[in-house]
Image (cartoon, coloured by chain):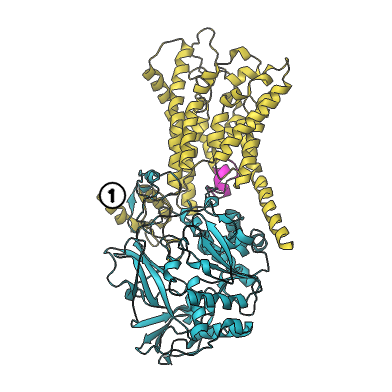
Chain colours: A cyan, B yellow
Amino acid sequence: MSKVIKIKKGLDIHLKGRAEKVLVDLGISANYAVKPTDFEGLTPKLMVKAGHEVKIGTPLFYDKYKPEILFTSPVSGTVSEINRGERRRILEVIIKADEKSEYEAFTKANPKDLQKDEIKENILKSGLWPAIRQRPYAIIANPSDTPISIFISGFDSAPLAPDYEFALNDDMNDFQTGVDALKKITDGNVNLILHQELNAGGLFKSVKNVEFHEFSGPHPASTIGVQINNIKALNKGEIVWYVNPIDVAKIGKLFNEGIFDSTKIIALTGSEVKMPQYFKITDGADLLSIVRDNVKSGDVRYISGNVLTGEKLEKTNFLSYYDYQLTIIPEGNQPEFLGWGTPGFGKFSMTRTFFSWLNPKKEMTLDSNLHGGERPFVVTGEFEKVFPMDIYPMQLLKAIIIEDIDLMEQLGIYEVAEEDFALCEVINTSKIEIQKLVRQGINVMIKEFS
Amino acid sequence: MKALRNYIDKIKPNFEKGGKLEKWQSVFDSFETFLYVLGDTAPKKGAHIRDAIDMKRVMSVVVIALVPALLFGMWNVGEFHFLSLGEDASFMEKFGHGFIRVIPLVLVSYIAGLGTEFVFVYIKGHEIEEGFLVSGLLIPLILPVDVPLWMVALATIFAVIFGKEVFGGTGMNIVNPALLTRAFLFFAYPSKMSGDTIWVSGLSGGEGVVDGFSGATPLASAAAGAMDKLPSTMDMFMGYLPGSIGETSVLAILIGAAILLFTGVGSWKIMLSVFAGGFAMALILNVFAADTNPYMALPAYQHLLLGGFAFGAVFMATDPVTGAQTETGKWIYGFLIGFIAIIVRVVNPAYPEGVMMAILLMNVFAPLIDHYVIQSNIKKRLKRAKA
């Protein structure tokens, strides 16, 4: 393994409710959903109607502009409902699961014996393609591109994130096959990124056909933008693809067994969970079927994903496609008298303006309160403490605000996505919605070049 | 407390859209958010936990950091008042005199400034921005004690409107509003802002002075070549000399600096580089010092202890809005402030003190410094793409 890349700028937020390494298989529940809204910039075209019988791997809809990208059913059963929002935008395709668990059949072969196009076609047909995303823009990869390399991060450094070594412990054979398949569809390397402490178990050490890179240090060490930027920064025109390791194993299973494996292992975490632990679920499960009564009383917020980048959902909603974690924290909707003037022994802050600095390692219970009103940018230098990339974060954000396309390009918009800025949003004194802003900037660029 | 919350919740609908006082919503919001950190929660998508810090917290930390300088300033005003009269007085008498002289300045600055801010809150329909909480205390601390109150009010209103609000409010201003207030007074009413009689309470009013007492600041003495009139290094450090209310005691300022640096609110890069720049320029002057200008031979470390140098470095140069915003830029920005301050001080006979000028000048140049720092990042990116 080459030299360790040390991330110095960053922040690990210690929260209560880390998942205990116990796995519970939840089996099949009543309803599942595939949500086109999970995929940034997607315009879906439906292929089924309510009442259609589907199997695991039957396509439900496709991308209007890249029709070869299919989105398939995670369960076998009947399409029960298509939920639409404003202007008839499709929000959810809901499938009522049956007991049979029938699979569509896909090509079963060693990827080493297949051509590049055969591999792509198999992944596309199975519905696993959306798991492959690209930088720039953090959107689903375009199948007609060839990336300069593919990144797989073997760890997630976000608060309470799942341990991939635990989740993938029994799937390393599939993971290797997945790597072999990915290796065939890039001209460059498949980069497997490991973390000195978070990958101490050494599960990924024996993987072949990859280029290893080792990182150390706090979050955002696991965001793909930070990893790419610290290994070899992305230039204009270059494309890198990235895949979550759990999805790599699913791609492997597709080639090993010829089926679309729609199960995944997720971590149920957060201070408001009674027993935080790991669950084996099926893609698109509703939160209630995962949480059941494993939640403390009170006003709580369900987050599909982690507290930095996740999406707030109702408990009757369905887990999002790219999330391997469900977090429950208290809602912070109570006003606090002179809250800005209290000593703040239990308050979280990166600065030492609250007395919580006396106890920095303490696991905290944090709620969703904003702790202040939105202001223009005033404090400088705070982003730089949690943004380990060779980019000027505040200047880039200002370029996005004024929609200066040239300036955004010059300041590195291609190298970033929302998740890279998540910590900036957390610690921002001016309470600006930074991740939303970054996505706006990216969408302006996509529109400009489409 | 519950009653207060209930009362606010009761009157709140009047200020919301459609209510009979809806035009006053932003003013109401300003008061409500002062009393309460609201129960507003993070949006649906994005970061769900947030740092407890907000603008009010940042500003109150700076205000706390200013308190040692304020308290020392009050005592020092009394000390020199009784010294000029040649009377003995107890600690409490001195402090009491200073308190009575300084508090009106503080009040006038806050009332004039916040009053103006609230007019803009009403006009803009956006709740108050907290920047003036600090400016309001900085203003009296950088003024001579005998300045007339109406001038302070006028200058403050001028600075808030033309220094800040015309640019869009806190976060958008180009120069430091507190320094603009001082600059306005300095150029509009020079007789009240310089000379040997304004720095000691009562002196400009013609109260009796004992023989041998001079109200001149050490910098004025030095500029006049009267090097023998300078106080000892220890007195310079402790602040036992006439000057603007808050600027004299380096010790009190350093306590404030420690608070700013420990909490992470102030930039150590700017503070350090201002001192480094001043020290460097003073050393250069030392090398070229001739008998004709004994001021140039003033030891470099004494330069850093005198006048508004320390106060400017710790509380003025570090203003994040008007200073350089890139980390590399902060080094350059701070260094040039220190450097230019000493040049103005020693080389230009018209201005006994150069810190205000240096900071205002560099406020204007800070965006240019940032521009070049950012250009180097842009060039690096372009070069990387070509390679």
| Extreme residue toward the front, this view | A206
Query: Can the viewer see residue A419 in this picture?
Result: yes
A339 over B150 or under it: above or below: below
A94 over A227 or under it: above or below: below
Query: Can the viewer see residue A63 in this picture?
Result: no
Residue A304 at x, y percent in the picture: 41, 69
B224 over A158 or under it: above or below: above
Q: Residue at x 51, y 79 (%)?
A: A252
Depth check: give the residue in front, B292 or B90: B292
Left/right placement of residue B32 relative to residue B338 reads: left
Q: Which residue type does callout 1 highlight?
A: Leu
Near mark 1 (Cα within 10 A), the count class, few <14, some 14-19 or many ≥20, is few
Tell me the SS state at disc 1.
helix
Q: The magenta stretch spans which residues?
A: B161-176
State the residue position of label 1: B4
Depth check: give the residue in front, A1 or A191: A1
